[in-house]
Amino acid sequence: MIIPPTTTSAACDVVEGNYSDSISRGSYYGQTYWLNWEACGISGCSLLEPDPEKTLFSTCSPGRLAPYYVAVRNVSHISAALLFAQVHNIHISIKNTGHDFFGRSAVPDPLAIWTHNLNSLDFHRNFTASDFPSANGQNVGEMGAGVVGGDAYRFFNLHGMDITGGYEESVGIAGGFGQGGSVGDFTTTYSLMVDNAVEFEVVTAGGEVRVINECNDAELFWAMRGGGGGTYAVLTKFRVQLYPSLPIHTYIFVANFTGDNTTQSQTLRDILTAHANNQIEWSAQLVTGSVDYYPEKVSFGAVLPYGDDGSRLKSATAAFFQFVNNRTDMVVVDNSYASYATYTDYLSVSAADARATEPAGIFRYSPPDSCLAIFLLPRKLSTHLSKLWSMVSKRPELYLLSRQPKWFSKSQ
Ligand SMILES: Cc1cc2nc3c(=O)[nH]c(=O)nc-3n(C[C@H](O)[C@H](O)[C@H](O)COP(=O)(O)OP(=O)(O)OC[C@H]3O[C@@H](n4cnc5c(N)ncnc54)[C@H](O)[C@@H]3O)c2cc1C
């Protein structure tokens, strides 16, 4: 089933109406999370953000997206597409939601394999692995390649389980996320999602459908747990260890700095120093979350999945809470705790945060507008503050304007 691009007025209305909605953008082959990856030079079909009735380019074309794509519904469609591409010597791309930061699912002029409709979900209370009895186990989740984070969280929560997903609900959890970084709010507690993978169903480049695990293909299984989507095979199903659902506790701290000399700001320096001083203890207490440092403000969101009333998070962050509460050189907008019965309850909060800090349906510019980065910071940076300051002073545009989603994650 090869589908050329279509346009009907009803379809256009839906696209316009949901232009900045991350879930909706991931549901069409012709859209990516950021407009950068839909455009090619001065051509593309992106709409004008302030007036979505108008287009941005005078020439409307698929831009970096494929002129033809295979909207796959089962593994045999993928095998057929791969064999067709081989016979005709056509370049292939694999796209799920189009959330890739570097646009790797939007490749000019290929035959695209669009996996987003492979959205089955299943739960195995008792799981039997393929030819690998030692991987048999309990509470294993199964996701088709197109499942997004929010749907996975909600489905497994119905079974009383949490999955080690990311913090944003529209990311393709089994697609690019599950084969790449796979960092999330459960990472400090249960490790990365790739570390919790039990088994994959894949289609190899030759079109062969295989179920792989630690036993029957240790190398491919290893490579696909972090090697990056689209590198080794087309993943069609991801089977992953789940955990009994935990309450989610959060600590939010938002403050506006006074004064304007950012890199020399004593307030910013003091906050970063206090952050670094507390980091080792927060990691030891399994606290995770995200922090945004801006020239004019700081925004913390610490998260702890834990089976208590929130006391553990309050105790871990008490010293920092008092430190920022007592300061008079910034305007504290928020310095508070909250608890949610399940991760599903917390999802609306993380989705709102993502909408504010990483909006979909725009062009993503490099600094000074914004710069997004994920770091696994070396543990010693928290104990050698001069190294931290040297990093900040040398590359202020990188470190002060960057979102560092997993500063709190376990660092080495
Ligand atoms: C708002 C937002 C929040 C994010 N939050 C987090 C986070 O908390 N933690 C984190 O670790 N990452 C996070 N990410 C990064 C995200 O995990 C990656 O961008 C991921 O690659 C997206 O995967 P996708 O399948 O949704 O996107 P796509 O752009 O469709 O695909 C990404 C890559 O994977 C390949 N791919 C997709 N599906 C398959 C498949 N079935 N088989 C083989 N290759 C495939 C594509 O070819 C492409 O190279 C976030 C991204 C965004 C936009």
Image: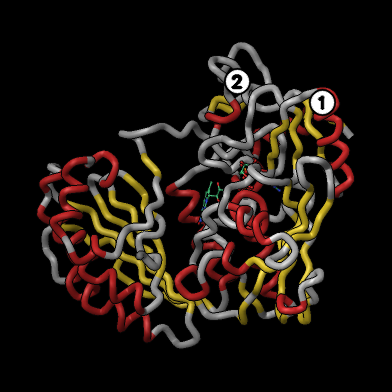
Identified at 17% across, 58% down, the residue is: 330
Badge 2: residue crowd in 10 Å (few <14, some 14–19, many ≥20): some
With respect to residue 40, does 76 lie above or below? below
Q: Position of residue 375 (x, y in %)?
A: 37, 53
Viewer-side residue, 313 vs 335: 313
On the rendered structure, is 410 left or right of 181? Answer: left
Say whether marks 2 and 1 touch (CB < 8 Å): no
Q: How many marks?
A: 2
Specify the amino acid type for callout 2. Answer: Thr
Badge 1: residue crowd in 10 Å (few <14, some 14–19, many ≥20): few
Q: Position of residue 189 (x, y in %)?
A: 48, 75
Cβ of mark 2 under 8 Å from ligand 1: the answer is no
Q: Secondary structure at mark 1?
A: loop
Any part of residue 239 in sight: no
The residue that disc 1 covers is 4
Identified at 48% across, 82% down, the residue is: 306
Residue 54 sits in which quadrant? Answer: top right
The residue that disc 2 covers is 55
Residue 232 sits in which quadrant? Answer: top right
Any part of residue 315 in sight: yes
Identified at 46% across, 77% down, the residue is: 339
On the rendered image, what quadrant is the N terminus found in? top right
